[in-house]
Image: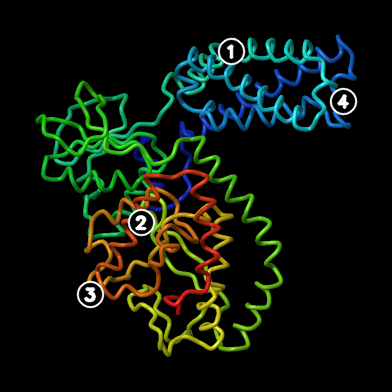
Amino acid sequence: MYLLNRFSKADTEITVPLPEAKRDVRLRLYLKLMLLDCTIIGSVFLTVSTLFGKQWMALDKINLMAMVIPIYVGVAINGNAYSRRSLERPFPAAAQAALNLLLAMLAIQCVLYFAQISDSISRFSFGLAIAISAALLAALRRPFSRYAKRRTGGQLTDDLIITDGVILGDHAITNIADAAMHNLQPNLHDPQMLNRLGRWMRSFDRVVIACPPERRHAWTIILQGAAVQGEIMLTDGRKSGAIGLGECLSHDTHIVSKGPLSVSSRMQKRMFDLALTIPAVLFLAPLLICVAIAIKLDSRGPILFLQDRIGLGNRLFKIAKFRSMRVEQADSDGTISASRSDDRITRVGRFIRRTSIDELPQLFNVLMGDMSIVGPRPHALGSKAASKLFWEVSHDYWRRHALKPGMTGLAQIRGFRGATDREEDLENRLTADLEYLKDWSLVGELMIILQTFKVLVHRNAF
């Protein structure tokens, strides 16, 4: 009943009472562990400062404790300290916690040295507080791991098995879905089917497919675009593009996808998005209002153009853009690409498209979590390269959706934008998008944003 309820919600989007997803439980556990770490560090520093006098903590009226805690949290997040591994393996997590605090201490010492105020700090008191905190943080990991397993019923992940033409028998404790019963087909030419599959898979951490060999390629592409750990169950020993080996129900599995980012990387990317988007919306508010007024005065119709686009996990979402075309001639499916002499484009529309101002409402898509600042550009369902739909050019097209779509991306800064008159136009974008997924880093994210300013006004933008 639990599995059917989750699938019912994915199909109908009707809210029904569901058991809490393990992913949500784990997120709260990570936050609790982070809060406990901060509490321990803060308590130890306050205690030591009380015993040895408060003056050693005064740094031009900035509390040293307030410096240690955020630096430690930043180092810990960067070191993937708040992850499933930290809950499953308490002893390596204990060593990681102590190492993170040591790295934070070294970072603080560098700051104090270059600020030329290190002499005002009691080295004994500071070292003692760090040592006690490190010991307590390490000691906390094992009992917290036990607590986490109790909170999740001993299973930290939600696993799903989809059987497609393979019979596995009865396994009462496992979430098993029959593809035929639920009308699920690994059809790479049906975006609506991939949207359904993406919505079903999004609340699971691990998805295992049991299918005949001839369907493994299609399921592999689907799993690689779903941003989950995806595995193909082996029933005949054949290979399937594996990146690792696993096990499920006494069968070996080939791991074909793990999702491109770790928990800490996803947190960094989301915080980076919000840190840029919130100030940008406030700063650009006068421009957004002026453009909205200009669009309204220039032609009848709504200010915003909303369209279904393919997003994270091949799921559909509504993208927001300033309307640049006449309402009666608008192409809701994106079947016809805009051309340089397109008479559908309004006078204001031509200017805002040329300067990329029409893309600015997507900042609100970023705030809502449907998009990111940087990522593969989301495409309309009817987009074509020459005479073929995008996914007909290459099935690898679906793999690019393993990350949130972005307002800009590696393909855009390389000049691959505008109409796709040839299949090569899409293949160039696809190569860049898959390179971005493979080599993601926060520094790379920043470099793409900086280089985007060079191509805001582009000869292929019309």
For this view, does 80 lie left or right of residue 183? right
Q: How many marks?
A: 4
SS under mark 4:
strand
Residue 384 placement (x, y as % from top left): 29, 71
- Provide the residue designation for mark 2: 432
Contact between labelled residues 3 and 1, with CB atoms less than 8 Å apart: no
Distance from label 4 to label 1 (Cα)? 28 Å
In the picture shown, does residue 126 fall above or below 8? above
Residue at 53% of width from left, 19% of height from top?
Answer: 96
User: Does residue 354 appear to the left or right of 111 in the view shown?
Assistant: left
Sequence-first tag of 1 and 3: 1
Which residue carries the number 4 mark?
58
From mark 3 to mark 2, how far is it between C-alphas?
A: 22 Å
Closer mark to the observer between disc 4 and disc 1 = 4
Quickly name the residue at label 3.
Answer: 387
Between disc 3 and disc 2, the foreground one is: 2
Query: Label 2 crowding class (10 Å Cα cut-off): few <14, some 14-19, many 20+?
Result: many
